[in-house]
Image (cartoon, rainbow, N blue to C red):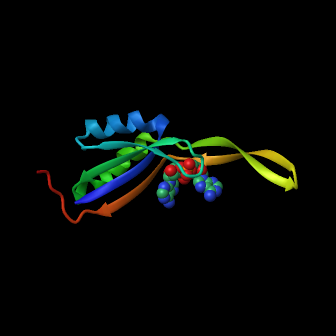
Amino acid sequence: MKLIMAIINNDDASSVSGLLAENGFSVTKMATTGGFLMSGNTTFLIGTSDNKVQRAIELIGKGSRKRKQVVDTSVTAAPHSTMSASVEINVGGATIFVLSVERFEKV
Ligand code: 2BA
């Protein structure tokens, strides 16, 4: 058995959730915050058998979009002065970790 942890942009969370549910995956969603942009994202926990991991990853990929986002950065140029600059970064689709599950119980 595996545990898939998938970090998804909030804008894609409902489409990923729908695709996984339609295909019989059990999912737990957690509200999380990205450490770089400090904006909300959604982390999915999906426990599934080894042979279904690839299918889950395909569905997550199908529901997640790659997008560009402009971020304002503050740069200290000299003492007592700051410049700000806008930088475009690529964000998403999904960041996925697959972990082996040592034991799974429902009691
Ligand atoms: P954030 O940490 O808020 O990062 C948002 C986006 O900012 C990232 O998109 C990436 O494009 C960019 N970014 C992150 N760190 C950067 C840096 N040091 N320099 C320049 N750009 C940077 P994604 O790669 O799609 O990541 C989306 C979210 O997935 C991340 O939100 C974070 O919550 C999570 N994530 C990504 N990689 C991770 C990892 N190795 N471990 C844990 N969480 C991760």
* Residue name at image x 38 percent, y 39 percent: 16
**Residue 39 in the figure: left or right of residue 51:** right
* Residue name at image x 35 percent, y 42 percent: 29
Depth check, front residue: 62 or 97: 97
**Residue 93 in the figure: left or right of residue 87:** left
**Residue 99 in the figure: left or right of residue 106:** right
x, y percent for residue 74: 76, 48
* Residue name at image x 29 percent, y 55 percent: 53
* Residue name at image x 35 percent, y 60 percent: 98
Q: In which quarter of the image is residue 105?
A: bottom left
x, y percent for residue 54: 32, 55
Residue 98's place in the image compared with 88, above or below, is below
x, y percent for residue 61: 42, 46
Depth check, front residue: 81 or 85: 81
Residue 13's place in the image compared with 54, above or below, is above
Depth check, front residue: 63 or 100: 100
Q: Which quadrant, please, contains the N terminus?
A: bottom left
Residue 77's place in the image compared with 39, above or below, is below
Looking at the image, which residue sits at the far left?
107
